[in-house]
Amino acid sequence: MSNLMETDVAVIGGGPAGMMAAIKAAEGGAKVVLLEKNNRCGKKILVTGKGRCNITNTKPWSEFATHIHPIDRFIKPAFFNFSNIDAIKFFDSIGLPTTVEQGDRVFPKSMKAIDVANILQEQLIKVGVNLLLNSEVSDITMVGDKVKVTYLSLSGLVNAETLIADNVIIATGGLSYPVTGSTGDGYKFAESLHHSIIPQFPSLTALMPVNYNRDLEDIELKNVGLTLLVNKDLIQMEQGDLSFTNNGIEGSLGYRVSRKAVKSMINGQKVELVIDLKPALSLEKLKARIDRELAAMGISGDNLGSHKMKDLLRKFMPAEMIVPFISCNPDIKISNLSEKMKDWRFKISSYTGYERAVVTAGGISTTDIVAKTMRSRINPHILFAGEVMDVDCDTGGYNIQVALSTGALAGTSASSNRAE
Ligand SMILES: Cc1cc2nc3c(=O)[nH]c(=O)nc-3n(C[C@H](O)[C@H](O)[C@H](O)COP(=O)(O)OP(=O)(O)OC[C@H]3O[C@@H](n4cnc5c(N)ncnc54)[C@H](O)[C@@H]3O)c2cc1C
């Protein structure tokens, strides 16, 4: 059975980008339909921020921009049109107060990601968006100067349906966490409409060391240094918190270097990570501190028994890390202990794929999109928003803010119907 519907704006995808695009387009006076393949919007929001959803980050643009890849200036007009401060005010105005945590990260006061997803979906309905859930878009084509959207209605009997729109906003997300509905469909749509697609790869993901010592699993290190070496060249140095998990090295520090590490591995380069357990101390200062601890323990000479070595290491690292640290560094002795603690090397063999990567790097080329409107340069009836574009950010609330900012701009542009 086929059924034809006409609308001013069709938004494909009900993540933060698509929902914000639909809200702004409807507020701008357009007749809006949002198509979401799941039985609810914002399924990915539910898993964000460990179930708490880090909505945005209050850093000023000059600092915020350093967390956007590969090109921050493409996002600047969208950010200033709907900034982090605007996002906080917006959520407050619709009944979701927020709170700021360490690192300028903003969370809902309730600390529940589901509240963010629910309130955005409720707001869609309030502003009059026609929300079509269980509706999976399969094709987007041009019919004269209108856009034809073909979708499968997945509730009850599966039906192929069609809708005709003046403007279509593609906000289908990337490829990461495909169970939430982000399966890269937007790349296919954009390519069929002649847009360039930058090859994708998982980012903000775990890095697996060669011969990974499983005793390290579940250990968390606070305020350590991490250096990324590619083909032995120093590429990136960071400081912060790191976690060892069943997938290898991750946590905010591991994630920060993962973008460049994964890209280098894809290019066939050799990747190494170096952990500095005492970044606040120079090698000399660390040596002096070890000497002081040894004197206090009444020990002299280079070779300690393993018992005494463990007693000494207890002064410098979490107790659960002592055994794996020694087995990763079997030649450890007093004379090389400071070097081992400041230069703990891991050769990296692989990385976790999209099934658990936080974001997708690559996507629809931003050179095909007008930064001031989010409208396609190739087809003025098509606009883009969110992670489907070649934009990805570090952890800290930057990704959702970019989805909201680009969504808001795309929605406003689509409703004003200004073709560039
Ligand atoms: C585990 C995890 C934790 C994260 N934590 C944070 C965090 O705390 N803070 C932060 O800023 N970022 C976080 N992120 C990243 C953030 O969630 C994403 O960058 C953001 O959701 C992207 O928004 P989007 O709207 O562009 O895409 P998505 O949220 O991926 O939404 C795309 C939507 O489009 C729908 N769709 C796809 N194809 C079709 C189709 N053919 N037809 C109809 N609908 C379709 C999908 O079902 C989906 O609902 C996290 C990501 C993960 C995986």
Image (cartoon, rainbow, N blue to C red):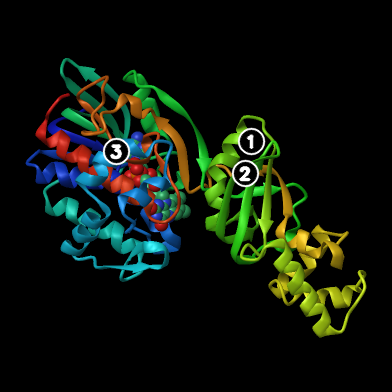
Q: Nearer the viewer, mark 3 or mark 1?
A: 1
Quarter of the image with the N terminus in it: top left
Disc 2 target residue: 351
Check whether the beta carbons of the residues at disc 2 and disc 3 lie within 8 A of each other. no
Q: Which picture quadrant has residue 90?
A: bottom left
- Front in this rendered view, residue 26 or 287: 287
- Front in this rendered view, residue 209 or 290: 290
Q: Nearer the viewer, mark 1 or mark 2?
A: 1
Residue at x 39% of width, y 38% of height = 391
Disc 1 target residue: 265
345 versus 145 height, above or below? below
Check whether the beta carbons of the residues at disc 1 and disc 2 lie within 8 A of each other. yes
Mark 3 secondary-structure assignment? loop
Total of numbered circles in the picture? 3
Q: Which picture quadrant has residue 293?
A: bottom right
Residue at x 70% of width, y 71% of height = 317
Distance, label 3 to label 1, CA atoms, is 29 Å
Query: Can you tell which mark lies on residue 244?
Result: none
